[in-house]
Image: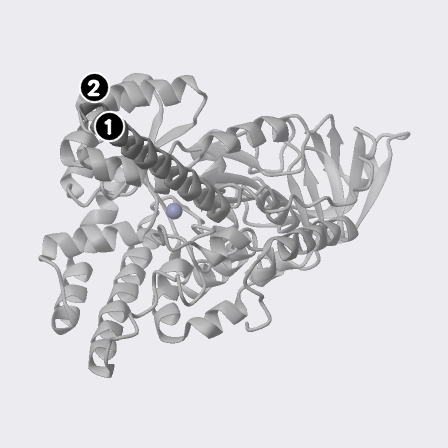
Amino acid sequence: MLKWIVRIGLALCAIALVGMVSTYVFIDRELNRMYGAFVKVAEPDLPPPGPDAYALVDVNVLSPEGDAFVPGQAVVVDAGLIRSVMPADSVPAGLETVDGQGRYLIPGLTDSHIHLWQSENDLLVYVANGVTQVRDMNTVPVNLRWRAEIEDGRIGPDIFAVAPQFATFGPMEGAFVGWTQRKTIVRTDDQVHDAVKDFAAKGYDALKSSSYLDKAGYEAMSEATRAQGIKLVGHLPIAVGLNDLWASNQSEVAHVEEFVKALDREFGGYGPDEAEAFLEYVRERSDEVAGRMIEHGISVTSTMELVDSFQRQKLDLHTELDAAELAYENPGIAEGTVITSRGMGWMPEVNIYRWPDQWDDDRKARSRIYWQAYAEAQHILFDTFREAGVPIMAGTDANVPVRVPGFSLHEEFLALQEAGMSPAQILASATSVPSDYMGTNAGRIQAGREADLVLLRDNPLEDIAATQEIDMVVLDGRRLDRAALDGLLESVKAANDESRKVPLEQF
Ligand SMILES: [Zn+2]
């Protein structure tokens, strides 16, 4: 009798174990699908790389100060570097020349806030849009492999790798959040110190605090990153205030929006009825905040268009999806998953910004007032930062709905222009400013720097929209003309189309 009870008990345990393992395998597969691991990899037909040494002649070159174009120039490229910049008529004889046709040469562009996740096709979409450097704000292991391959000549932007963001959660929730959202879960100071050391040893370039890091964790991160000499970037955790930021090792805040949230916490949390009072509070506080940013050498990344789009995604998601270059978006991300829609999922059923269906008109009207004030607060802070001279880096949060890699940087430029930045300031925010921040050897057209360049048809200092008319991208010296860039885009579209479950015709 006892023998049978034991046997039945063991059988039930085995069934439960098999159930747990298969649930784990199923969910893990679903997560990888959502992050894009199974998206067909695009196979573009690339022209053979030309000779290592050549001169790009008859171009207007953006000056290192970024405020003017010098006409009639030649840029001599050799082995992936800019060797010299000189008048076009003094190019040494015998060097292969490429005719720049009097067009406008700017440094390759940087998007300072993106999420690569797991579809390799994003790399090509960035390059096709003139983005030769990205700061990946949640780098997962496969991205480190891509970074190494790109350094070896694979087509893709250089990657500044920020480790999976640090967050504090209890054991059960922490295990789930860490797994599904690819975050670094920490609960003790020792765990923070160990994780920081570990990521630094693995070659990550910076570490990121998330909104969900507790105060002790934030202070430990600040101490540990200081000790390791590695940058601390990212969100300002909900558990801390601006005074904690000023006292920390954090040198970059990943969104202007973070300051809206911090000031809202100081204010005590505004609702639609307090929207005007909150904006008044933001106006009163913004000068002091900007002053402290400069005093402590803290940069901010813009992501203006993302926050401006919250309201539009709530009000009319269909139009927003319609306007986005969805064909080039990682289909896994766009389609999302029901397992974790946090931050992922663009389509109406999974979009995190949409209004819940059960909301009535009154609730929606109040929500609209709230989000309008939220966007306005962002603009007040942005204006103050810009006028005070806080270093601003252009960033999009690409792969967050509905920011398509590469394309979204040009949309961000238009938003920055609309918000009062001059074209020269916008170009700097995507070239010299992020290059100086990340310590890369790019970002300016100067001898000795990496030959990451973009040739434009029109003058972007007159209208920043000119950055969308790309004639050629030079990636570590390798030239990709317009036909090659179109080839990259076509190959990505075809591969993504084969991988999507939700057809795009409806948008
Ligand atoms: Zn982000």
Where disc 1 sits, the SS reads helix
Q: Residue at x 18, y 36 (%)?
A: 170
Q: Is residue 162 above or below residue 408?
A: above
Residue 186 visible? The answer is no
Residue 128 left/right relative to 137: right
Q: Residue at x 29, y 23 (%)?
A: 225
Give the labeled residue for mark 1.
Answer: 4
Q: Residue furthest bottom?
A: 361
Q: Residue at x 22, y 69 (%)?
A: 370
Where disc 2 sits, the SS reads helix
* Image position, residue 268 (x, y; %): 8, 57
Residue 493 left/right relative to 482: left
* Image position, residue 38 (x, y; %): 57, 44
Quadrant showing the C terminus: bottom right
Give the labeled residue for mark 2.
Answer: 190
Quadrant showing the N terminus: top left
Residue 374 left/right relative to 147: left
User: Marks 2 and 1, Cα distance to the nearest angstrom?
Assistant: 48 Å
Identify residue type, mark 2: Asp
